[in-house]
Image (cartoon, coloured by chain):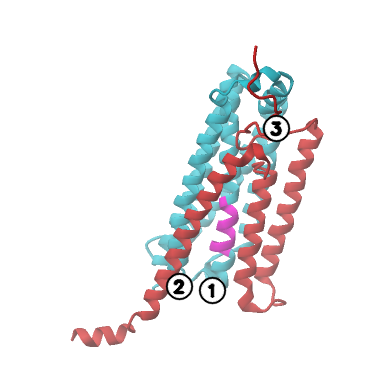
Amino acid sequence: MSTVALTDTHHGAAIRDWAGAAPKRIVTGYGFWIFILSDMIMFSAFFATYAVLLGQTAGGPSGRELFDLRNVAIETGFLLASSFTCGLASIAADTRSTIWFQLAMAVTCALGLGFLAIEGNEFASLVARGAGPTRSAFLSAFFTLVGCHGLHVSAGILWLLTMMAQVFAKGFRADIQRRILCFALFWHALDIIWIAVFTVVYLIGSAI
Amino acid sequence: MTHGHDEVFDDIDVAPGDEHVEGGGVGLRILGYLTGLGLAILLTATSFFVAGTDLVWEPSIPVALVVLAIAQMGVHLVFFLHITTGADNTNNVLALAFGVLIVILVMGGSLWIMANLNHNMMPMDQIMQMQR
C-alpha cells in the first residue's frame, strides 16, 4: 500500500535520486482514475439529454407524478453507507486484516443489493403503470440515465464479490491490493454520480 | 557515489484514492471517513429538505440544489477519494480538472444550444400551416 511505500521512501533517501518509472500502484491507480473520469463524461452526456428532455412528456406523466422521494432518500442512504463501509474495507486491506475486510465488503455488498432492489422495484412499478421507457422522450432519458447507473452498480457488486473471493483465495498480494484500490475508486465514483442523479433527476425533476 | 541534488522531495506522487497519512493510525483514517459521512448526510438532508419546503423562494430551489450537490461531490472527493491540494496529488487533480472541463462543456453547451433552438423555433401550429 502507498502508506507503506511512502514511509519506505521517506526512510530510504537513496531511492529519491533514482528518477525511474512511477510505482506500479500509482500507474494502475492513475490509469483507472482516467477511466473513471471518462465514465463521468459519458454520464454527463446522459445528464444533458435528460435535462433537455425533462419537459417532453408527450402528454404522459411528468416527474412530479411519478417519483417517490421517500424511496430515493432510502436509496441515497444505502449508497452513502455503502461508500463508508467500502472505505473501511480499504483501511482493512491496508492493515491486511482479512476478517474486517471481508466483513466490510459483505456489508457494502448487502447495501448495494438493497439499493438495486429498490431501484428495480421502482422501474417495475413505473412500467406496470404504463410509464415505461417507450412512453415519452422524458421517460426514455430517465430510464437510460438511471438504468446506466444501476448497471454500473450491478457491475460493481460483481467486482466486489470477485475481490472477496480473490482475497480469500490469494490473500493481500500486491496485485490484489491494486485491484482493491481500483474497486474502491469505482465504488466511490458511483456514489458521486448518484449525488447528481438524485439532485438532477429526482429533486429537480419532480419540481418541474 | 555522487548525489545530483540533495533536496528532500515531499511531492512523491500518490495513487488516486490512496491516503497520504503522516503518522496517523487506523483510528485517524476511520475518523476521516466518518467526517465525510457526516458532512454528506448533512448535505443530502439539506437537499431533500430544500426540495420539499415552501420556506424558500421557489425559483431559487434548483440553483440551491445544484450548489448543494456540487458541495457534496467535493466532500466525497476529499474524504472518500482523498483528492487533495497536496503536491503529491497534482497529477490526479489535473486529470480531474480536465474531466470537469469536458463535463461542463457537454452539459452547459447542450442546455444552451437546445434552449436557444427551442426559443427560436416557430410554434408547432404555424409550422403545420406552412406545410399546407
Q: Nearer the viewer, mark 1 or mark 3?
A: 3
In the rendered structure, does residue A195 fall within the stretch colored magenta?
A: yes
Residue at the image point whose x is 65% and y is 31% from the top: B12
Quarter holding the C terminus of chain A is bottom right
Query: Which chain is displayed in red in the rendered image?
Result: B
Is residue A59 at all visible to an observer of this figure? no
The residue at which mark 2 appears reads as A55
Q: Position of residue A178 (x, y in %)?
A: 58, 27
B82 above or below A9? below
Marks 1/3: CA distance? 51 Å
Query: Mark 3, residues whose alpha carbon is within 10 Å: few (<14), some, or many (≥20)?
Result: few
Q: Say which element carries label 3.
A: loop
Mark 3, residue position: B10
Camera-nearest residue between A28 and B84:
B84
Dot 1: what SS?
Answer: loop
Q: Of marks 2 and 1, which one's residue comes earlier in the chain?
A: 2
